[in-house]
Amino acid sequence: MKNLFLGLPVIFILLFYGCSKDNPVSPSGSGEMRMYMVDSPANFDAVLINVTEVDVHSATSDSNGGWFVLNSTPHVYDLLSLRNGLSAVLGDTMLPAGQYSQIRLILGAGSSVVINGISYSLTIPSGFQTGIKLNGNFNIQANATYQLTLDFNAAKSIIQTGNGKYMLQPVIRVVANITSGTISGTVLPITANAIVWTVSNSDTVTAYADAVSGYFKLMALPSGSYTLNIQASDTSAFKSTAIQNIVVTSGQNTDAGTITLSPK
């Protein structure tokens, strides 16, 4: 897999003033909503997703109304660049204070997956019309900022349908930043090309150690205690290991330090 650019977080900031699909929204009694996107690793060269609109839905409205726009400017994201601490901001806007229950991503033409240097168009069922809808209850409070992270799992989301065709069936975790944190560290030797993972509820959260530095970062982990699993890409050369009882605290990063894999 190609080497990824890692390091300090790089954030693509998109600023938009929120409005309802039906009526303009007054900033009075409003709070800020900021939505990030990150990705888990996958064995592709690139996964390019064209997001044309991001909306959220008021919990007090029916399905025919109550949608508020966070972002209406199309942007193509390479999901595989959003790893090990890197993220993109899908939208940053003011919303009326209150409870919200759904997120909707409208995707446009041009989404693709690149495998061994060859680009394949992605078929996205309903992505162009009704959008990809995600459930997640969150409360916007007046004069406060609410941050939410969408964790895309590209490896599970892309399905080969045959005859060189690929389909996107998104697998996405929705995690509130206020109740989540991260785990980071470094895996040596670098030649191990290690994969690092842990389990959050029923979801496996994964990262590849950087091919240059060995650095990794697991994102959007709800606060709690975790077992960190580390395995070399060549299991015949290095022993796998696990570190138990790593505590994640909301809003903080837990540094697992340097983890050295032993040769077999």
Image (cartoon, rainbow, N blue to C red):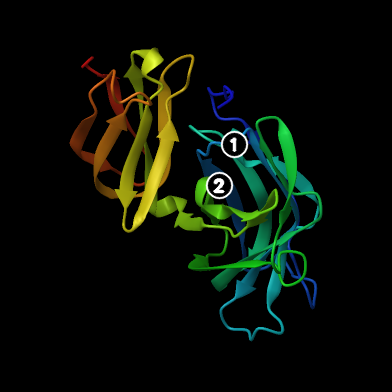
Residue kind at label 1, given as amino acid type? Phe
Q: Are marks 2 and 1 in contact (CB under 8 Å)?
A: yes
Question: What quarter of the picture does the C terminus occupy?
Answer: top left
- Residue position marked by numbered label 1 in the rendering: 44
For label 1, the crowd category at 10 Å Cα-Cα, with few meaning under 14, some 14 to 19 and many 20 or more, is some
Q: Position of residue 193 (x, y in %)?
A: 41, 22
Callout 1: helix, strand or loop?
A: loop
Q: Is residue 251 visible?
A: no
In the rendered image, the vertical position of residue 192 relative to residue 206, given as above or below: above
- Residue position marked by numbered label 2 in the rendering: 154
In the rendered image, the vertical position of residue 155 relative to residue 1, given as above or below: below
Q: Using the rendered view, name the quadrant where residue 218 is placed.
A: top left
* Label 2 vs label 1, nearer the camera: 1
- Residue 248: mark in rendering: none
Residue at 31% from the left image edge and 43% from the top image edge: 198
Q: Position of residue 63 (x, y in %)?
A: 66, 83
Residue at 61% from the left image edge and 30% from the top image edge: 10
Residue kind at label 2, given as amino acid type? Ala
Q: Position of residue 235 (x, y in %)?
A: 30, 26
Q: Using the rendered view, name the quadrant where residue 209 is placed.
A: top left
For label 2, the crowd category at 10 Å Cα-Cα, with few meaning under 14, some 14 to 19 and many 20 or more, is many
